[in-house]
Amino acid sequence: MLLAQRGLASGAATSQRVRGACSPACALRPAALARPSSRRAAPLAPRAAGADADAPPAPAPAPAPAAASGPGAELVPDSEFSITKISYGSILTPLGLGLMVYGFGAYFTLLPGTDISSVLLIYGFPMSILGFALSYAQLEPVPCATTRAAYELRGSQMTDIQKQIREDTTRYRYGDEQHLDEALDKIWRFGRQGNPPKKMCPRLRGLREEVVEGAYCLTLEFESKLELSIWEERQPKFQSFFGPGIVARIMPTKQGVDVQLISDGSGAGRGGGEKKDVLPPLMPGLPARQQ
C-alpha cells in the first residue's frame, strides 16, 4: 500500500515536470503561426463585371501608320548612283599631286622609276591644276528629302521639268553661282526697273519630295530676305516657267519661302523630253515657233 502511494506521487511529479518543460514551446507556437509573412502577393488587376476568367487577354493596339508627309513621314535614302554626284576636283587633285610628288622623287633618284619621271611630271602637273580649278568652281549639290509616298508616285505623276530640277540640283555643277541661276533670273529679272537687285537673289537650300493632297509635290526651299508679297506676285511666273502640269504655291518659312510645285494630275509635261524653247514668229501675225 505504501509502495503504491509512492508510485502515484512520483508519476504526478513527472507529469508536472514534462508539462512545465513543454509550456514555453507551446506558448510560442501560436505566435509563430499568427506572424504575417514578409512576402506580399501582387495585387490582382480589377476584373470587369461579367468577364470570363478563362478568356484570353485583349490584343495590343496596332501601331499607327506612318504619315505620308511631314516630320513623321518615312524617308527613302538616295541610293541611286551617278557619276555627276562625284566631285571631279576631289579625284583629280590628289591624283595629280601624287603623280607630281612621285615624279620629282624619281627624277632626283630618291624613288625608283627614273625613266618615267618625266611622264609623271607631264601628266601630274596639269591634272593637279585642273583639280584645283574644278574644286574652286564647283557648286555642291543641295540635300533632297524624299518620302516613301512621294517616291511611289514618281513614275506616275512627276513631270519632266520636276525631274530635271531634281537631277540638276542634286549633282555637282561647275561655273554657276548658284542652283537654278538662269531660272531665277528669268522669273525675277534682277536689276531691272521695278525688280529687286541681284544681291537679293534667293538661295536654294534644299529640296523635298512629298505628297500634298494626294499628288506628287517637289518643294524648293529658298533662303530669302524678300517680302512675302513680292513672292506672291511672282507665283504665276513660277507656275508658267516650271509648267505645264504643275500648280505653284508660295509657303512662308523661317528661313524664307518654300515654292511647292504640285502635279495637277492632268498628265501634261510628261512627254519624255525637255521643254522646247519658244522662238519668235517668221513674220508679224504668224504664231510663235518652237525649237
Image: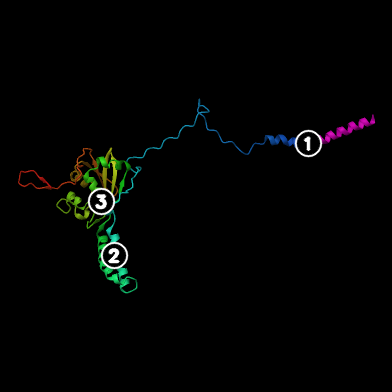
2 or 3: mark nearer the eye = 2
Does the magenta portion include 169?
Answer: no
How packed is label 2: few (under 14 Cα within 10 Å), some, or many (20 or more)? many
Position of 187 compared to 223: left or right?
Answer: left
Q: Determine if residue 165 is in view.
A: yes
Q: Secondary structure at mark 1?
A: helix
Pick whichever, 137 or 102, lies toward us: 102
Q: Which mark is residue 96?
A: 2
How crowded is the residue under tag 1: few (<14 C-alpha within 10 Å), some, or many (20+)? few
Our reading of the magenta stretch's main secondary structure is helix
Q: Residue sitting at 29 percent across and 63 percent down? A: 93
In space, the residues marked 2 and 3 are separated at their CA atoms by 28 Å
Going from the N terminus, do you reach mark 3 or mark 1 first? Answer: 1
Q: Horizontal and vertical percent for residue 32?
A: 69, 36
Instruction: Tell me, for residue 22, which label it has, or none.
Output: 1
Circle 3 residues within 10 Å: few <14, some 14–19, many ≥20:
many
